[in-house]
Amino acid sequence: MILDARDPDHLDGELVGLLRGWLPERRWYPVKGAEAELTPVATVDLADDVRVLLVRARAGSVDVLLQVPLVLVPGPTGGTASVVGTLGDRTVLDGAGHATFLAAWLAHADGPGADVDVTAARVVTGEQSNTSVVLPDRATGAPVGILKVLRTVAAGDNPDIDVPRRLTEQGWGGVPEPLAWAQVRWAPAGAAPVVGYAGVMSAFVPGAEDGFELACLHAREGRAFGGLAHELGEVVAGMHGALARAFGTTDDAAGPATVSQALTTRLAWSTAAVPRVADRADAVRAVAAQVAALPATPPRQRVHGDLHLGQVLRSRDRWFVIDFEGEPLAPLAERTRPDLALRDVAGVLRSFDYAAAVGGLTGDSAAAWTADARDGFLAGYAAGAPADADEATRAVLLRALELDKTLYEVVYEARNRPTWAPIPEAGLDRLLP
């Protein structure tokens, strides 16, 4: 079912007025350090006392459409955590974790659903870009679903919903199954109506451990990670196979030149930002030349796009892959563009360096731990990956993609976490002769 939004009315305008003081305190609010222009765009009436506002927030380079579900209740209400403000004799509440909103949302959503107790919902704290709500099973009380209320809404597909749906349809079990999802249709000013996703409820992964935190713990305790990394490699290979079946593949005759040029462009950017990178410029160009000399690259396909250890969960002796959304503020075409599957592989390999460092390993100990994790992951991936290129070609491409990622990290750490700068710089030393 697609939820049809209507034009804003007078009450919606008053509600947006309340949001001016409330929104800047939300972690997911994308306008930081500036006063934004807020304009009501459309409203979905889920129930008599539940309104979902679509509000345009614009300040400087930020121009986004926000989704703000609100519940209006008569009189004052106990507690202040979810109170947006008051209008006359009614209290306006943030609806994201409110039972009334949750019941109305689930009643309108598509998908197989689940029998959940909305009165016992729990909002996940600390999220940066959306609001997630854990929903328990009505009979057992155990968590069964987690609803992600998208705070930034965009027209078109949403990779974080479409991709898990397609993977589940392919019978691949390495992603939490989408149980319910909702789309909304609205008319931007002076334009034809468009449709975008408003949220998704996925199966809850019990006892889940964050992959990066788990790797850091192993490093800290001096425990090898190669076995778990091997299993993760097999899962990532299975994901790539399912993605190729679901979305297809495309050949790229200019593949070697494209990858080579991207690496030299990244080198120029990183050298301008961190001049000491210039000491390694000749070695990077040599790798770019090796790529350019390749006869072909593997077919491009749909990939995760931002895969690292923080995007996987370990639960009950299984790995799950999550967060297919990519950068929420990036254009949809950029987030869904076919790419080399090896780019995901490179992202995971780079994570091992960070896990070793955060886990407190240095010198030979760090090198040995990282090598064990890398070897395990690559062996697991090779066991399940399609034979779309010879081993030598894959090695050249993977090295180039790792270098591209590492050069990005060098700049990021220099600008944001200078004490972490040695991590990617050590990665450059390992990847380059």
Image: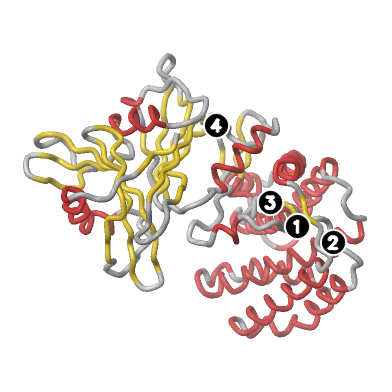
Say which of 89 and 120 sits in front. 89
Q: Is residue 225 visible?
A: no
**CB-based contact (under 8 Å), mark 1 and mark 2:** yes
Question: Which one is earlier in the sequence, the residue at label 3 or at label 2?
Answer: 2
Q: Position of residue 300 (x, y in %)?
A: 76, 56
Marking on residue 205 = 4
- The quadrant in which residue 432 appears is bottom right
Task: Quadrant for the C terminus, please.
Answer: bottom right
Q: Separation of disc 1 and disc 3 at Cα?
A: 7 Å
Question: Which one is earlier in the sequence, the residue at label 1 or at label 3?
Answer: 3
Instruction: Assess disc 3: are there few (<14), some (14-19) or many (≥20) residues with their C-alpha within 10 Å of its C-alpha.
Output: many
Q: Separation of disc 1 and disc 2 at Cα?
A: 8 Å
Q: Amino acid at mark 1?
A: Leu
Question: Which one is earlier in the sequence, the residue at label 4 or at label 1?
Answer: 4
Nearer the camera: disc 4 or disc 1: 1
**CB-based contact (under 8 Å), mark 1 and mark 3:** yes
Nearer the camera: disc 4 or disc 2: 2
Q: Name the residue that disc number 3 marks.
A: 303
Q: Name the residue that disc number 1 marks.
A: 340
Q: Position of residue 43 (x, y in %)?
A: 29, 46
Q: Amino acid at mark 3?
A: Val
* Secondary element at image label 3: loop
Marking on residue 297 = 2
Q: Separation of disc 3 and disc 4 at Cα?
A: 22 Å
